[in-house]
Amino acid sequence: MSSTQGTGGMLDAGTRLTTERDEQVTVKSLLGFGGQGEVYEVDTPGGPAALKWYFPQLADVHRWRILEALVDRAWGDDRFLWPRTIVADPSRESFGYVMDLRPKRFHDLPALLRRDKAVAAATPRSLITTALNTVEAYKTLHEQGIAYRDISWGNVFFDPDNGDVLVCDNDNAVVEGESAGIEGTMNFMAPELVRRDQGVKPGIQTDLHSLAVLLFYLLMNHHPFDGALELRIHCLDEKAQRKLYGTEPVFVYDPVRTANRPVPGEQDTVIATWGVLPQVLRDLFIKTFTEGLTRPGERARESEWRDALSAVRDAIVPCATCGKENMTQPDGAAPECWKCRRPVDLPMRLELTAGKGKRRPQRHIRLNRGAELYPHHLQEDPERHDFGTPIGEVTPHPTTPGRFGLTNRSARPWRVRRADGSQLEVPPGRTAALRPGLLLELGDGAEAVVRER
């Protein structure tokens, strides 16, 4: 939604409306507008809320039925500003719906490209967390057979401090195979939708392309197809966009087709950010924006993005020289700091094997000072990453500089076996000294060993 000031929209301040639940809402002010309608702050019996009010030409029976289904679903996920109840006013020949009000700590993703002061607190860790939370939010929808259909930078808001996300405009989310009357935003749409291929409709497979574009914008501050070919276009009209994003899309870092590489001096941001992106993420972008352009089934799935983003978050290392955070390949060699260009000194890592089942994934956690373990580290297939309450934390030795331990922040004891074969118990609140070869039993079948690098 585009921001605006004042109350000069379709609804005047003070207008009273009635919801389907027979509750009164009072319009306070216009918050913004978009392609489907306007959003207002309203007073409700339960406190302040937001009201999306449709333009009359879009307020049809089909839209009403979509809203009814969404409200009946009563989605309780706190990452979504889900429709709570419908509001109608026959005298105005339109209707809308009430949803929770977006807290001020959440900002739109274009603020990153604008380098707004409001998002200056964003760090590699918070951006990777934003990407991870975004992927898991859409994964939750898709697992219920719901396609969002318009994933774009206008529909996701994030907290630059911790990476929390909110997904809005959920009135476009309908069950796979049904129509929502919207195909998406041009530069986020899958090529087959841009080309208007016969029989192709927006759905979960096209969502996966849009999601990858969104992640590329978030981490690269750039569109994946805007390279040298885009700079040669004198007028980026609809015809030119259909060629760039639909009929002849070329990924800027396609390993084979190099005609669309970013241009130094003109597109330096994407050149720099791609240069420091860990290979595990590069591989997913390359897969989605090469093979996935013509074969939708080859696009990276949400679970692949989740696992890769989680691994990269666990491998973020501060530079010992300048203090800036650096993303590193989870089990790879030390990179060069993106800021001061000095080699990053990699700390010891925890090689953790999770769960009790057949899958038992292995995770690599860099043991920087302040690094934390969370409940999801012990799970084979975590439904959602929760960074609220750690179960372990890397802490400095109280008297010996440069030595660290892993403090048990959980509610149950750990078992530890040293390299010499001796064993001990680490109760909650106590610390195990970190040395290469140390073996830990963390509970729930999770086992870990400390590695040198």
Image: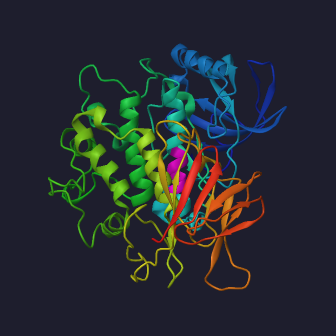
Q: Answer whether residue 168 is magenta in the image.
A: no
> Which residue is depicted at the point 19% across and 38% down?
247
In front of the other: 5 or 157: 157
Q: Is residue 196 visible?
A: yes
Q: How many marks?
A: 0
Judge from the rendering whether residue 390 lies leftward or rightward of residue 285; answer left or right.
right
> Which residue is depicted at the point 38% across and 77% down?
336
Residue 403 placed where, x, y %?
A: 62, 80
Residue 222 placed where, x, y %?
A: 36, 57
**Above/below status of 280 relative to 341:** above
Residue furthest to the front in view is 421
Residue 453 placed where, x, y %?
A: 45, 71
| Quarter of the rendering containing residue 79 | top right
Name the image colouring: rainbow
Judge from the rendering whether residue 165 lies leftward or rightward of residue 242; answer left or right.
right
Residue 175 placed where, x, y %?
A: 49, 20
Q: Is residue 108 visible?
A: no
| Quarter of the rendering containing residue 86 | top right
Assign the magenta stretch its main secondary structure. helix
**Above/below status of 75 relative to 217:** above
* Quadrant in the picture for the N terminus: top right
> Which residue is depicted at the point 41% across and 54% down?
217
Q: Which residues are magenta?
A: 128-134
**Above/below status of 198 relative to 138:** above
